[in-house]
Image: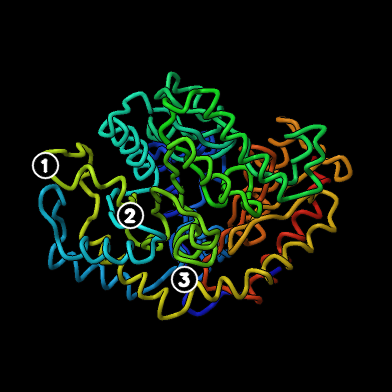
Amino acid sequence: MTLTTPVDAPTAYSDAHNAELQQKAKDHLWMHFSRQSVMESDAGVPIIVKGKGHHIWDSKGKRYIDGLSGLFTVNAGHGRKRLAQVAAKQAEELAFFPIWSYAHPNAIELADRLASYAPGDLNRVFYSTGGGEAVETAFKLAKYYWKLMGRPTKHKVISRNVAYHGTPQGALAITGIPAMKEMFEPVTPGGFRVPNTNFYRADEMSPGLGLGDNLEMFGQWAANRIEEMIEFEGPETVAAVFLEPVQNSGGCFPPPPGYFKRVREICDKYDVLLVADEVITAFGRIGNMFASTTYNIQPDMITCAKGMTSGYSPIGATIVSDRIYEPFRHGETTFYHGYTFGGHPVSSAVALANLDIFEEEKINENVRKNSPLFRQELEKLLDLPIVGDVRGAGYFFGIELVKDKGTKETFNNEESERLLRGYLSKALYDAGLYCRADDRGDPVIQLAPPLTIGPNEFAEIGEILHGVLSEAPQHM
């Protein structure tokens, strides 16, 4: 597919300017979650210079569809002048002030707004600057809460296999991806893992039970593994369960019907807190401000970040129930935790304006209306022998790739390396689609485009994917 260049495309950087940037990157830039060896290649690192709507441009002037919203973040789309102007205006008025014993209007107004969206009695907002910090906050708060309740042995946390919850030491203990932790061992103790809700692999996860034929029964089985872990470790040692409403890592695992109802029952039975990690799923990704609303989850805490500002300024938050906040209401009890830039005046102002856009343009409604059409477009890829499964919700989908469709045989590490890094990542990018080819689990392609797109863009994404995946077997 040839992507036409619109009038507002940026002027391509000169060869000399590109070469200079590549050399500076090679000499000094340490990228996140990336192999630095890419800097040594002749092509160097892609340099993105502009975004508009659901498109991005590189320094050579080529346009791409942003099929990942940057990093599950630019939910309202790129190039919103309104958000840039709000940030500039706030920076002129009050660029910075901490919320350490002081406050400023934007932090107050945003806290009120977030509480109004959150389910149940989640009424207190503790700010951070990103998702990992929000998870770290929830972990520390869960342990402290139980100490204040006179139950200091409740310190362990449970999460799911292959789940990603961040990279700070505490959050890393909750993350369920061993390969991301082994080089940092020993991490914070107390993290324990249970099965996720990958229904495509249900028979492998629960051999002999035949759960691959019944989604609801599989969900109950997966939820009951949480109870099993709590009993095995001892209820008086378990502080909280951390779950994403739709698990990201591994390729977009939605919750089976009844799963979170059962999890809530288990948490109540054993007096364990339930934390919904909504760093990705909040702010429209699944079609509501919080996916906890979508799936009728009643968590004790919600962690969120990314889409709160659509990436125009960094911010995160941990939203806490009245129950957990109660010990801090009176007296001298203090939560000795915080971040210099948490609740930043500029970020808070941008978040408020971003949420205004969501409401004015009915962005959540757009996701709910068009998500089935997005799914239909992606499910056309199931005709390809390499595509085993298409799953997800809202504007958040994963496409699992398999070596043998009949047996669901996956690729070994060497094959996955050749497929994802040797071919797919570059081929998709060259074809004009920025998305994610991921192997934190079985190989998947992940899609999470800006929430403003519709059927025409779905078709364009689907056409690119079909072309690239059709050629994939030849590169194995």
Question: Which amino acid type is shown beneath numbered disc 1?
Answer: Gly
The answer to whether marks 2 and 1 mark residues whose Cβ atoms lie closer than 8 Å is: no
> On the image, which quarter does residue 433 sit in?
bottom right
How far apart in space, not on screen, are marks 2 and 1 (Cα)?
A: 33 Å
329 and 61: which is toward the camera: 329
How far apart in space, not on screen, are marks 3 and 2 (Cα)?
A: 19 Å
Q: Which mark is residue 52?
A: 3
Q: Which mark is residue 314?
A: 2
Q: Secondary structure at mark 1?
A: loop
Q: Nearer the viewer, mark 2 or mark 1?
A: 1
Question: Which amino acid type is shown beneath numbered disc 2?
Answer: Pro
Q: Quadrant of the N terminus?
A: bottom right
Which one is earlier in the sequence, the residue at label 2 or at label 1? 2
Q: Secondary structure at mark 3?
A: strand
185 and 293: which is toward the camera: 293
Residue at point 81% right, 57% down? 382
Which one is earlier in the sequence, the residue at label 1 or at label 3? 3
Above/below status of 183 relative to 199 = above
Q: Which residue is mark 1?
A: 331
Residue at point 39% right, 48% down? 300
How far apart in space, not on screen, are marks 1 and 3 (Cα)?
A: 50 Å
**Where is residue 223 shown, x and y percent of the image?**
61, 41
**Where is residue 149 shown, x and y percent of the image?**
28, 34
Q: Is residue 122 left or right of residue 93?
A: right
Q: Secondary structure at mark 2?
A: loop
Residue that protrudes farthest toward the front in the picture: 269
Residue that protrudes farthest toward the top in the picture: 186
Residue at point 79% right, 44% down? 212
Which one is earlier in the sequence, the residue at label 3 or at label 2? 3
Q: Is residue 412 left or right of residue 397?
A: right
